[in-house]
Amino acid sequence: MPETLQSGTTGLTFQDLILKLSRFWADQGCVLALPYDVEVGAGTMAPETFLRVLGPQPYRVAYVQPSRRPADGRYGENPNRLLKHTQMQVILKPPPENIQQMYLESLSAIGIDLDHHDVRFEEDNWEAPTLGAWGIGWQVMLDGLEISQFTYFQQCGGLDLDPISVELTYGLERITAFQQNVKEVYEIKWNNTFTYGDIRRAEELEFSVYDFEVADPETCREILDRYEREALRVLDSYRALKGPKDDDQRRRFPLRKVYDLCLKCSHLFNILDARGAISVTERVALIARIRKMACRVAEIYVDRLAPVEEAQPA
Amino acid sequence: MSNQERDLGFGVGSSPIAETGSQSSSPNPEPPTPNPTVPSGSTIPPLHRSNLLWVKADLVETLSSASLPLLLEIGCEEIPARFLTDAQKQFGERLRAALEQARLLPVAEEDPASQPPIETYSTPRRLVAHVPWVLATQPDQSEEVMGPPVRVAFDAKGKPTRAAESFAQKNGVRVEDLLKVSTPNGEYLKAKKLTPGRQASTVLKEILPGVITGLAFPKSMYWEPSKTRFVRPIRWILALLGEGDQGHVVAFEVAGVATGNSTYGHRAAGTKPVSVSSFYDYTQKLGELLVQVDPEKRRGRVLDEIEVLLKFPALGVMTGTAKILRAGAGRTDPNERLEAVRSHIRALPDESDLRLITDRDLEDWVVNSTECPHAILGTFEERFLKLPREILITVMRDHQKYFAVESSAGKLQSCFVTVLNVVRDPKGNIRAGHERVLTARFSDAEFFWNADQKVPLRDRLPMLDRVTYQAELGSYGDKVRRMEAIAKSLCSTLQENGKMTRAEADHALRAVQLCKCDLTTQMVQEFTELQGVVGGLYAAYQGEPHEVADAIYDHYKPAGLDDKLPRTIVGAVVSLADKIDSVFAGFAVGLEPTGSSDPFGLRRAGNGIIKLAVEALPGLNLLDLVSVFTEAGAVDLRLPQRPSLEVVSAFLREREEYYLTEAGKLRYDTVRAVIHSHLGWRIPSEALQRGKALEKVRDTQDFGALAAAAKRTHNILKKSAAREDWGSAMGINKSLLTDGPERDLYDAYEASRATLKDLEARCAFEEAFRVLATLRPAVDRFFDKVLVMDQNPEIRANRLQLLGGLRSFVFSRLADLSQIEGSISPSGDGATSGADAGATPNTPD
């Protein structure tokens, strides 16, 4: 193995990678949004993606999003697997024609010399059954390493999208480990002083312990049920708001909070799943319940778009 | 394309994939220009894609003024590798159909040789079709149209009426050009309508969009406002009619993309469009832009490169190739040169003992996911070789798309071959990247292996109570307990029949207990496709007897009719117990297959059961085995509901019919005859034997006649004879038989019974069928001369008894001969039907 992969450099630190990618996408006209503050299983679930891809308004956004997948927890022991990993999430609505080229330029921007690497787009269609969302696309492979998902969203919240959005997600730990040429994710330099392990290993351990050993399935079920009841209660109240005089009530309808409740349910479902506490049929039923909430949120979001103004791109 | 035609020009010079081979398929070939960047001594002159085109040079000459070449390229974002071959084929077929329908191809009947060979190519980023010649203009078309009757078309003075005028006008002719034609209904007007042919470019712009959007893919998408569906976004379309100065773009638009005369190269060759003037120019330029459009040439290059790599692992492809190509120096004939190079490769001593583990699916994937394939050899740390071969190969092949490498003795080597989509890897960066990814993957597997060993399989059994099998069916712990009950019953039967030893039975029960425990391991949670295999490997590692370990390893086999069987009887027992449980469990909760839906995969399990019963446990009485667990059986599997024998038998019988047809290759009606016989389906291996024996004799004349008699008997017994016709007598009363055909038949039947019984016991079915066939004359004469439905009720009942006996022991014991189709009618059919007139409807179906 050669001493370094990047001739002359040792690769960006984790935080520099975030900064460079953010800069690149900001330069492409993206709103640089902040990570969402409710647990999500993937960057897609953050409202900046789930809601923004709905409706006709063009939009471009980029944000870093920590994503939690309890089933992937390995107590901080596995060299490459994380319960909470970090994605850079980019939405381009509608996608420009040169979108693939733009993506490749983003790789150059973070120091990947495309003349000396093999970047491939391999079929990988994405689906999020709890969101009623799916798309067509690829996993992007860099010398055999999956570094991104590249998806043309087709549906979200059960609704056909018009226009289509492209979603780009970057696996930031993987890319950094690749560039820094380290054997395990915990050896990544976060900055020049701290490693990824310094910052995150304890968190991985504790969340793994909770999700695999401590979490009480009954309690999780109970909370999930309550969040769902609350979400449905609020959603039901929207039905009454039909007439033109209800415009203001519709505008004030706390849709985004309902979506948070839906995200909570999704995360609890993931914990139950990690515990192996869900049977095959129960799994199908639970996914359907969460999807139903997500789809109702999406419908209301679109319903409200026409009369009510949403943030427009600058 | 044969190996001889394979282009060996890989990895040479700075433009290693410049192809000159395709030019010969251009109808007006430009002179081949040697690639100046290729070092002398290693240039490979163009290979002829198709000799056919050279033969037809004259024809091309005559056509050239009236015809034009057409080049079409759909430029796309990366098309999934698994769709590419079919898409390429479809593209060619749809294009030909469209051109034919638009009358832009020469008429095939007039001269089949004038049909252009439509050549298609593909890479992940393009679908290409080249038609060497289409007609520059459609031929004029004349048709005859019938009009109104002459008496209506002209008035009394013979002047044309409105009817005549409007008919003429409608068909674009003058009234005076209308013809009269006589028909049986009188005289009618006729118009000869002439439609002038239109120019190809006009027609093509109408039909080509449909050719493109009509391509069907297993999964498609939309991406822009017109909502056109395609496999991936279309980014450019090259549509060139004619070439050189005469070439022009066929102007149309698909999914917002307008056609042009430009293409794009490999991503590594820049992002600028490159205009092309002919197909020759196109392949030349794409070659310079690092694209090989012909998948078969890419395949050839990959295979050749791998061969060199494995022979000279230390040199790498570049140096290895240069060394080898010297062997071809000095030969002018390209094929000779290629052969010289190839035989040189073969003759060279191996510098190392490396063999590719070939994998056609992976090879196809590699070919269809690259524009300029380049094989490299990577290595991994020796220590990973202590992980099992199965796991290493799964990681390399399924997860990383690498070819694994072994020694000639079959020992896995610590290296792999991967195929890049770039020209080269001069610094070894890419190889190092792949090696690191593989190391990480193997480290994962190693981590799982070590973590899993902390709790051996035998201690994981209680954990299965927490793994759900299916909500209503409980856990895998429950499933294993049911499998134990089934295996016990199966083992005792096999032991009674001397097919299994006590030790084997013990091993089988142990293996049943452990076989699902690997579901709780991290290795299987990561590599689910290795369930069973991992259990077997762990069992061996943890000191279980190898018989037990092998049985666990094999217990998902056979996964289909083509899959291998478990290697041992112990494995067969575990597999059978697993599958029988799945079937019972599925039926117990109403998850049985209906129509095209089979949520529990029961048909597959059923196919496995039959295959095991025939091939691994011949002689097994499957009906006896399963009936124990049904509603009325002795053993309760404690399912939510006990399926009835009827339901389970009907399902297994259907699977057996499928097996006999598909795996046994028996004719459909042979299968029915065997399954619906008295011996039935219960012993699947024996049913297959009977079927095979029946196929050997069924086409003989005697047998065909016998089958017809069987049908007749069946009809008499089933349709003509009422219950009361049978009387109260049991068995045949010999004293009531009349001399002649009736008694002769009885005697013949009695005489053959003992023989048949003996042959059946020895499973000598073919001979038994031949003995049956000897009864034919007696049977024929009986039907010829004897009226079964006699006036005398006693005689009638006795004759029915005789037929009943015949049916039980002759016509449907080994096979229900009445099911055999296309039997030859018995001779003297007229007389026969006369004899039974009024009693039977005409028998043959």
Image (spheres, coloured by chain):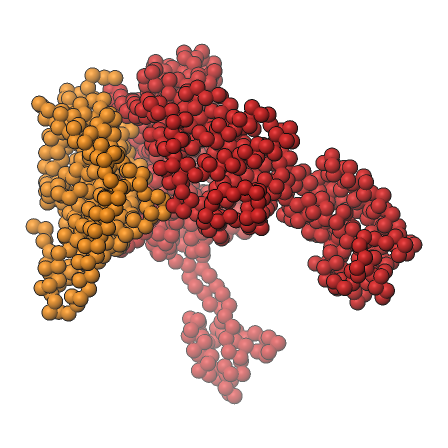
Chain colours: A orange, B red
Who is closer to the viewer here, B48 or B792?
B792
Residue A159: image x %, image y %? 25, 55
How many marks the image carries: the answer is: 0
Q: Residue at x 17, y 62 (%)?
A: A237
Going by the picture, which residue comes out furthest to the left? A314
Q: Residue at x 37, y 20 (%)?
A: B387
Going by the picture, which residue comes out furthest to the right? B739
Who is closer to the viewer here, B688 or B225?
B688
Side of B659 where B15 appears, left or right: left
Q: Is residue B498 above or below residue B784?
A: above
Q: Is residue A109 above or below residue A63?
A: above
Who is closer to the viewer here, B328 or B35?
B328
The answer, for residue A220, to whether it is visible in the render is yes
Residue B321: image x %, image y %? 37, 18
The answer, for residue B280, to whether it is visible in the render is no
Which image quarter: residue B172?
Answer: bottom left
Quadrant showing the N terminus of chain A: top left
Which image quarter: residue A300?
Answer: bottom left
Who is closer to the viewer here, B755 or A104?
B755
